[in-house]
Amino acid sequence: MVELTLLRSGNRLADPREQVALLEGHTPTPAFHQRLASSGCETLRAAGITTLQINVGRVCNQTCSHCHVDAGPDRRESMTAEVAEACLQLAARAGITTLDITGGAPEMNPQFRRLVTGARALGRRVIDRCNLTILEAPGYTDLPEFLAANQVEIVASLPCYLEANVDKQRGDRVFQKSIAALKRLNGLGYGIEGSDLLLTLVYNPTGASLPPPQKKLEEDYRRELRSRYGIEFTQLFTITNMPISRYLADLWEHGKFDAYMEKLVTAFNPATIEGLMCRTMLSVDWLGNLYDCDFNQMLELPVASPGATNVLSLDDRAFSELRERRIVTGKHCFGCTAGAGSSCSGSLQ
């Protein structure tokens, strides 16, 4: 039944439940919790909450083939002012140190600037998960100056330093627009040695493979971007493509799903467990629903805490329970523990 209903128009999956069914039931690989147990970790639990990752919706100016959010110009999911304000109130009273804003293209959400200014007024660190091309889009060209004025850290997708590879994954002319955006950011001080304006680039593999060693790849990026375009940046993160949404559909359509899952499972590294991002993060969707991470959010796997399901109704007692909650896991989690590991802060090793 999964085979008959998995794919819809383009590379979009029909339903998160079908994704979970495929991930958990199709492949003969062991369950993630079984592999954890064999490594001495009976139950994966949170170890506090320092980061609130806010997914403001799925509206985006791009349609990337690897996108686990299934974002694009045709999406309408968008966070309201009420939910955004609840996120800021939670950050204020709960000792959260970092607001990590993502999407879609988070900058396209009407609440984006309010989240930024509100969090900075609280003295919180703010991260913008930026696709770069939005900085060149009509109506958003003042964003670089806004981000710089508020000392927002930019974590920007650039899956390769070669134009053909980037455009294949992210769309025609994306690379040239990204280079233009990076030059503007450099001009404001982003990524320049000695500056407080941090610019992190993100690499995703263009095929069904794991990322190469992060340190070596950062050296390659720095050399090539500097020599070809005069571009500087602070650091590079390598992030594994998660078998969710468009990327899962692409793997299935091309007969690579089983092999990719086997690759992730075989590369399981118990040394990554301690640093998994879900252990110190709480994820909020555009409706305010709570998840252990953005990947669980896309699969509609809510936190395992019945009294704490939405930021709009989250009281201090329920939040306290979330600090030590059991993390909800599935086979997609092998994407975070494969090889050197993968998180929103790059390699774990």
Image (cartoon, rainbow, N blue to C red):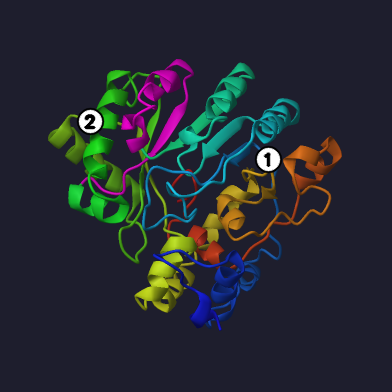
- Mark 1 → mark 2, Cα distance in angstroms: 35 Å
Q: Which mark is residue 231?
A: 2
Given the current orientation, which residue lies at the most extreme left position? 228
Q: Residues within 10 Å of mark 1 (few under 14, many from 20)?
A: many
* Residue under the point 70% across and 66% down: 42
**Residue 156 placed where, x, y %?**
38, 38
Few, some or many residues within 10 Å of mark 2 (<14, 14–19, 20+): many
The amino acid type, in three-letter code, at marker 2 is: Ile
Residue located at (61% from left, 19% from top): 123
- On residue 319, the disc is none
Q: What range is drawn magenta here?
A: 133-161
Name the residue beneath numbered marker 1: 49
Question: Is residue 136 covered in magenta?
Answer: yes
- Find residue 287 and report its horizontal and vertical position in percent: 66, 44
Q: Which residue is at the front of the view, 193 or 319?
A: 319
Whether residue 4 is visible: yes
Say whether residue 276 is visible.
no
**N-terminal-most mark, 1 or 2:** 1
